[in-house]
Image: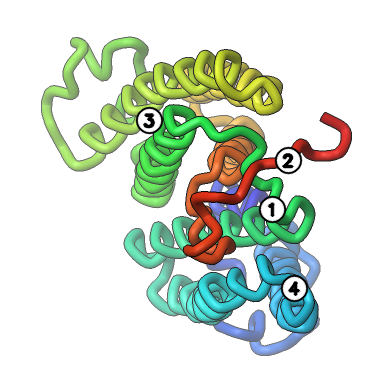
Amino acid sequence: MAWGNLVSATGSGLACPDWPLCRGTVTPPARPEVILEWGHRLLAAGASVLILSCVILTWRHSKTNPYLKRLFRSLLTGLFILLIAQVLLGGLTVMLKLSILASTIHLVNANIIFAGLLLLACVSTWGASTQSVDSPKLKRLAVTGMGALLIQLLLGALVRHGHAGLACPNFPGCLDRFLPIPLTPQTLVAFVHRWWGVLLLGVFVHIRLAASRQAPSLSRLAGLLMSLSVFQVVLGIYTVRQGLDTHLRATHAAVGYGLWALLCTIAFRSGAFRSLWTPRESTAGLAARPVAGE
């Protein structure tokens, strides 16, 4: 995912104008832009093999693990379908010459697959103790944060693929004033993306406070989430001020995925989406047990 953003930031998305091959071969010329784009496809192919391996191994171990058995039924089939869709979306993005819509859906779908892998890691590692502390408030905040952050990632993709990164070149104002006037699709999406990110800080602060009061075992993760979100906002401002420096743009996107990973982990650990891996008849009465090392 981070490599894909580097491809986008360097304008290398059509260095391989055909699909699935690159310039009609598996050994394209070793130009920087071709290496970036072809390398991204090879990484995606490797990741696909690993994800399919996870699906197969989960199916095998689900015979003896009741949590994996339920998770396989409710999640793994969907993960497999999303993976196939992701591969096809990658090809469609190239064939449509980097369509904004196709590129954005491609990125959002990748984050949903990432969340599914995180959930699989949580359940296969922690089992019944995935819910470290029963905190309804933290669970609600984490789920709300996931939805809000996914919107932010979508907005970021629209900004990037719609070339709207410098539509609002100033901060805190957009152009000559605070509001994005004259209002265009580019100034609107850049403005909303900027201030939606600032509003997200409030959600992450509340998650940190809820975790420290009701779920001490998740307090450290919540503190890292809050600190990283502050860094992300500052990095976003600095990236615009530096005229969308390539490495800053790629780092900004990668930090966004780090926030997504932390938030998903906190949500799963607080019991969100628990029905995906815990049988309904045992959800209410299952007591959480501490995780080793906590």
Q: Nearer the viewer, residue 55 or 36?
A: 55
Query: In the drawing, what numbered circle is on residue 202?
Result: none
Q: Which residue is mark 3?
A: 166
Which residue has dot 4 on it? 54
Q: Amino acid at mark 4?
A: Cys
* For residue 129, above or below residue 231: below
Residue ID at (58%, 63%): 277
**Residue 27 x %, y %:** 80, 81
Mark 4, mark 2: which one is toward the viewer?
Answer: 2
Q: Earlier in the sequence, mark 2 or mark 1?
A: 1
Q: Amino acid at mark 3?
A: Leu
Q: Nearer the viewer, residue 235 or 169?
A: 235
Viewport quadrant of the C terminus = top right
Q: Residue furthest bottom?
A: 24
Q: Position of residue 19 (x, y in %)?
A: 57, 83
Q: CA distance from mark 2 to mark 1?
A: 8 Å
Label 1 crowd (10 A; few <14 / some 14-19 / many >=20):
many
Name which quarter of the figure residue 167 lies in.
top left
Q: Residues within 10 Å of mark 4 (few under 14, many from 20)?
A: some
Residue 102, above or below 266: below
Inter-mark Cα distance, 4 to 1: 20 Å
Q: Please give the residue where the numbered disc 2 appears in the rendered image.
A: 289
Quarter of the picture containing the N terminus is bottom right
Residue annotated with mark 1:
128
Q: Nearer the viewer, mark 3 or mark 2?
A: 2
